[in-house]
Amino acid sequence: MAELVLQKVSAQMLVPVSDDDQMFIRQLKTGQVIRAEFRKTRNPHFHRKFFALLKLGFDHFEPQPCQMEGTEQWFTPEKNFDEFRRWMTVKAGFYDVIGYPEVVFGFEPGA
C-alpha cells in the first residue's frame, strides 16, 4: 500500500506533490480505480505553538501530594509530560464520553 500526497490546484483537479507521487500516478492504467482515505495535514505553526505552550506549562508544573479518595493514603504524582499533555487536552474539553452497559441498561455495578 502506498501513501499518495495530492494538492488541490483548481475546483476539480488534484495533482501529485512529489516525484514519487507522480511516478505512482503514471503507473496506473487508464480507467483503473484506486481507493484512498484522505486527511488534511495539521498546520505546523499551530502544532509547534501548542507544544511550546505545553512545554511551558509542564516546566512550571509541580506535582502536589494528594490523598486517595476514600483512604488515608497519600501519594505524589509522577511528573510525566505525556500524562500532562493528556490531562491538559481533557481539561480543554477534547475528550469522548464512553457509556458502559450497566449504566445504559439501568444495572448498577455490584447490585
Image: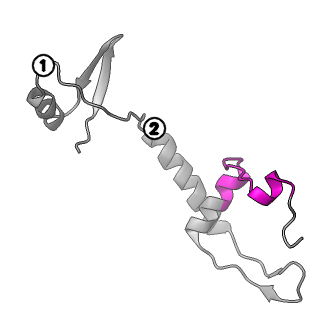
Q: Few, some or many C-alpha atoms within 10 Å of disc 1 (few <14, some 14-19, many ≥20)?
A: few
Mark 2: amino acid = Asn
The residue located at (45%, 39%) in the rendering is 42
Instruction: Work out how far the residue at label 1 is from the one at label 2, CA to CA, in angstroms.
Output: 34 Å
| The residue positioned farthest toward the top in the image shown | 11
Magenta stretch contains residue 84: no
Report the span colored magenta: 87-106
> Residue 7 sits in which quadrant?
top left
Q: Earlier in the sequence, mark 1 or mark 2?
A: 1
* Quadrant holding the N terminus: top left
> Residue 31 sits in which quadrant?
top left
- Give the residue at mark 1: 30
* Quadrant holding the C terminus: bottom right
Residue 6 location in percent, x, y?
A: 28, 28
Side (left or right) of 38 relative to 51:
left
- Give the residue at mark 2: 43
- Of residue 62 and residue 78, the one placed in the foreground of this image is 78
Depicted 4 relative to depicted 1: above or below = above
